[in-house]
């Protein structure tokens, strides 16, 4: 069984559209994250939730809004997509703060 | 704020050569250190981690890393690389004051040639 799963795997859309990426983990972890990997492979954290509570909110445009319906799910909604949003978005989870993070397969977003 | 630097951006080795990838971090307090690997088109996988204790840690696939506190370093090593080790390698750090934020280095692209 996949530990951290994301849907969709690929997302191609037009500028200005709104899209969502879903993430689910079946590891029983308490903390989940969203990372953005740019074209140069640089990874940067965007958000982190612990037991459905937002604990990390990096400097991200407010067009990005995470939602955690329960501790096994962390979704990312993006409004008014821009060309610069094109990247790979990775979801991750960890048992607790400081412990290793396990990553999902990534969602490759391309904004045209 | 903590930062992580990886000195080698691109490394090309022949099979059976030895590997050492540099990683330095800047933070004066307690750190948890990680190396992740990203094979082409795949997600990140944990290679190894250091929390405390023996500064020489062994990970999967024959990789090891040594934590040298005085040098703020956590270099990754493998005695003999294989073609299948071709991937992007990321060093990362979590600090006690960092709110569980995993800060990544810029990555090292390793290419192993037959």
Image (cartoon, coloured by chain):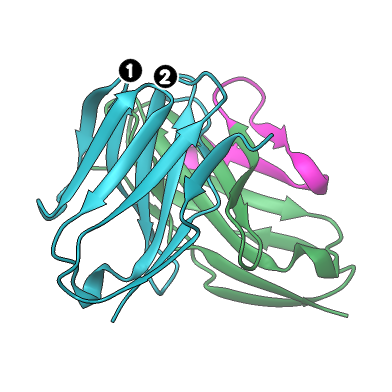
List x then y, in percent, for residue B84.
81, 65
Residue extending furthest toward the left = A62
List x then y, in percent, for residue B33.
51, 37
Mark 1 and mark 2: Cα distance apart in space: 5 Å
- Read off the magenta span: B50-71
- Residue positioned 56% across, 66% down in the render: B108
Chain letter of disc 2 in the image:
A
Q: Which residue is mark 2?
A: A30
Chain letter of disc 1 in the image:
A
Is B17 placed above or below B62 here? Answer: below
Residue toward you, B45 or A53: A53
Disc 2 on helix, strand or loop?
loop
Q: Which residue is mark 1?
A: A51
Residue toward you, A108 or B23: A108
List x then y, in percent, for residue B39.
66, 62
List x then y, in percent, for residue A69.
30, 26
Q: Is residue B32 visible?
A: no
Question: In which quadrant will I find the N terminus of chain B?
Answer: top left
Question: In which quadrant will I find the C terminus of chain B?
Answer: bottom right
How many other residues sit within 10 Å of disc 2, few (<14), some (14-19) or many (≥20)? some
């Amino acid at each position: 069984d996949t530990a951290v799963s994301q849907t969709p795997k690929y997302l191609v859309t037009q500028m200005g559209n709104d899209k969502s990426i879903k993430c689910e983990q079946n590891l029983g972890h308490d903390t989940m994250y969203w990372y953005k990997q740019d074209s140069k492979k640089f990874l940067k954290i965007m958000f982190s939730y612990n037991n459905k509570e937002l604990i990390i909110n990096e400097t991200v445009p407010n067009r990005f809004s995470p939602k955690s319906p329960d501790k096994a799910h962390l979704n990312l909604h993006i409004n008014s997509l821009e060309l610069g949003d094109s990247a790979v978005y990775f979801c991750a989870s960890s048992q607790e703060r400081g412990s290793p993070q396990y990553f999902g397969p990534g969602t490759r977003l391309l904004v045209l | 704020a903590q930062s992580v630097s990886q000195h080698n951006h691109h490394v090309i080795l022949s099979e059976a050569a030895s590997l050492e990838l540099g990683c330095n971090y800047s933070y004066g307090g307690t750190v948890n250190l990680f190396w992740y690997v990203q094979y082409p088109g795949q997600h990140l996988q944990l290679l190894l981690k250091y929390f405390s204790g023996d500064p020489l840690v062994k990970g999967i696939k024959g990789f090891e890393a040594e934590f040298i506190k005085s040098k703020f370093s956590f270099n990754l090593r493998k005695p003999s690389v294989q073609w299948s080790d071709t991937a992007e390698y990321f060093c990362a750090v979590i600090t006690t004051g960092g709110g569980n934020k995993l800060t990544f280095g810029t990555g090292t692209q390793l290419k192993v040639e037959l």
